[in-house]
Amino acid sequence: MATLEKIRSKSVLLIIVIGVALLAFIIGDALTNSRNIFGDHTTIAKIGSTKIDITEYQRKREELNNQYEEARKQNPEQFANFDTQLLPQMALDQLVQETVLNEAVAKAGIRSTPNILKYYMLENPNNQKVQELMQALQGAGIAAQTPAQAYDIIFNPKRNGLTEAQVEPLQRAWLAAENETDKMIRQQIYQRLLVGTVKANDLDRKALYNDYVATQNVEVAFLPFGNLNAKDYPVSDAEVKEAYNKEKSRFAVSEDTREISFIAVPVMPSDADVAACRKLAKTTVDFMNANKGPLSKEIKNEGVSFSRHTYRTDDVPQNMRMALTAPVDSAAIAYISNDGFAVARVNSITQQVDSVQVTLVQAVTEGLGNKVLAALNAGLPADSISTRFSVDSVAAQTDQWITLFDANGPTNALSSAQLDSLRNANGRYISMMAGPQGMLIAKLVKENPATTVYEYDEASYVLGPSNTTMNAERTKLEKFLAKNNTAAKFAANAAKAGYNMQNFVVTASTPAVPRFAGMNQYYPESRQVMRWVMIDGKKGDVSHIYESESLTAPILYVAAVNDAYDDYAPADSKDVKDYLTERIRREKAGDKLAATYSKKAQSLASAAQAMGVQPQNVAQFRFGQNPGVADPEVMGKIAGTPANKKVIVAKGMDGIYVYLVMSASRENFPFNVQQYDQQYYQFVNPDLFGMLKGNAKYKNNIYKFEAGD
């Protein structure tokens, strides 16, 4: 009873505890559901109100990655330096453009026709999946030489000796290819219509024509501004603000933007590391002189790699040749530097034939091959075997050269046993291979003269910084960050501490941290830094230290977020302020210098003399096409000036121009509508994606899903 009373007395408290726990569970579940329902939990990008799901991106990323891997296999040299950090954003860019285009196609109600679909599937297929289907059929032993034959086999299985179950996967694949092709056709139709909206009218064509045929003979004297002194032409913050307000639209951004300061510290091997490298080189030479075969486990653990090579004299790499002058079975250092070393041990120096000339004959069965072999050795010429045997059963290739060594070493086109058999046959034909698939018959015709061949072992080592060196650089950088833990301090003191700081404007669409402003080169493995900048970093924050994973050329990274905005770059942004300040300064310099030289412009010669420059004659000045004037506003002024031989002073954004229009004329060129339609399109250079996207805001969430911290 006492126990029961205790339980009863605690019942209210238990109910409260259980209730609170249940409420917390319900609220937590509701919050989770609300994120899934109302948030962007799986949205990798958003254009206006259109969301792109992470699963769509993952499919596109896999597709692009497969394309890259295939391209790399086919062209390894071309893709050797390709930065795979670009792939995620490339995949998303493609997906975004496809999404925007598909929405536009759907809104326009574009449709393809059965005849067009038939043409692009059967008669002129450009969908790779159709080719893959044909290859799948051929791989299964089913002859399908054309897409039409493949279609008939897949959708009329009984007529082709197949069951519905056998072709059912192929039917699904074909229908999927049809859907893709149909989408592609509708996209192409819409794109042609979109391009057609950017078209010159009669006035546009005539204006382009007139600009080209109208020429002037112009004398020009030009004095460039060069670097203008800020003291001579001061610019106030109020002037910058006023200019910013007038041109604010110029500084609009299409997505979330960050201005960052960035330090990259390449860690180089220390003097102690170089000394250890040289000691390891000596240890490696001593071991290879004392032992045949691979390196010891201890030397391998130091990072020394081992390989065996067989090369003709001329194919031996240049940096290995001196080491190969050592006696056989001895090792020597091929090269040693602050980048590492290589050691070579000569195993053999032989004289070998690098190519042979043979006559080859093939027979479809082993039995037929024996008959052909007997006939050939009885005197039947190889090029006459089709006179005695069926053309479909035999084939001959006379005087074929087989390469035994190329620049990469032995080709293994013939084994040593096969070559010996050919030599020992003394000019007779022998069977090289025989079996159910037929027989290959060969006769040695000629051998190239023997050449010197080296077989050697190579031990190589690429020197990178040791753990001690890495830790020292990291400690030094950590001390700097401890004292400079805000973006302002970071930017102000980096150079004083001996660090090379760079400034960048980046967005989530920036694939990685750029190496140089305005260039598509990126620091290795710096997407992790970009993730921090776009996801975790706030204005004024400084990141922790990131590191590339290279063992031989590691780099330490740190970034600071100086500013963040998603609509307009602010007036106090460094790039904006620098641009406006320079522009205002040039305006002031132009006004002052134009007034100065206007007083001295009694003639072009006197103006040029006062400016300290030589005048230039532009015999055929055309608007937009001339070598003497770069500033577009001045170019327009000259084109609109009559040939009155009046000296005119004009300020440009690049300097002061003094010019004199001597005469004007018109070239006698025929007017061609098609030519000026093309010129107009090139002049406008429309951004088709921008036309489709319009003013829709772009939200890129890629770093929420990629490049984890």
Image: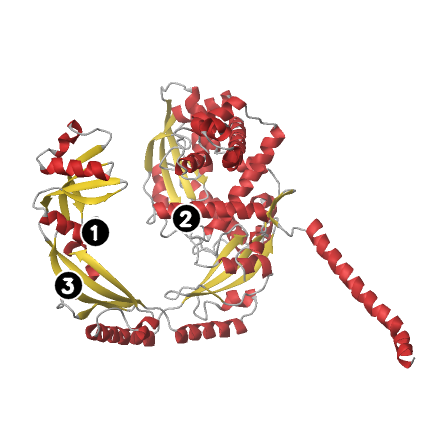
Confirm or deny contact between disc 1 and disc 2 (CB under 8 A): no
Q: Is residue 641 visible?
A: no
In the image, residue 322 sits, relative to residue 63, either above or below, namely below
Distance between mark 2 and mark 3 Cα atoms: 39 Å
Pointer 2 or 3: first along the chain = 2
Q: Secondary structure at mark 1?
A: loop
Image quadrant where one finds the N terminus: bottom right
Distance between mark 1 and mark 3 Cα atoms: 18 Å
Pointer 1 or 2: first along the chain = 2
Q: Find residue 141 and report its horizontal and vertical position in percent.
A: 39, 36
Confirm or deny contact between disc 1 and disc 3 (CB under 8 A): no
Residue at position x 43%, y 75% in the image:
472
Residue at position x 36%, y 20% in the image:
669
Distance between mark 1 and mark 2 Cα atoms: 26 Å
User: 230 or 441: which is nearer to us?
Assistant: 441
Q: Find residue 183 and report its horizontal and vertical position in percent.
A: 54, 32
In the image, residue 406 sits, relative to residue 129, either above or below, namely below
Q: Quadrant of residue 352?
A: bottom left
By what rule are the colours in the image chosen?
secondary structure
Return the residue at label 1. 407
Q: Residues within 10 Å of mark 2 (few under 14, many from 20)?
A: few
Residue 594 lies left or right of residue 370; in this view the side is: right
Q: Find residue 295 and report its horizontal and vertical position in percent.
A: 27, 71
User: 49 or 184: which is nearer to us?
Assistant: 184
Q: Amino acid at mark 3?
A: Ser
Q: Amino acid at mark 2?
A: Glu
Q: Residues within 10 Å of mark 3 (few under 14, many from 20)?
A: some
User: 398 or 469: which is nearer to us?
Assistant: 398
Return the residue at label 2. 69
Return the residue at label 3. 348
Q: Amino acid at mark 1?
A: Ala
Pointer 1 or 3: first along the chain = 3
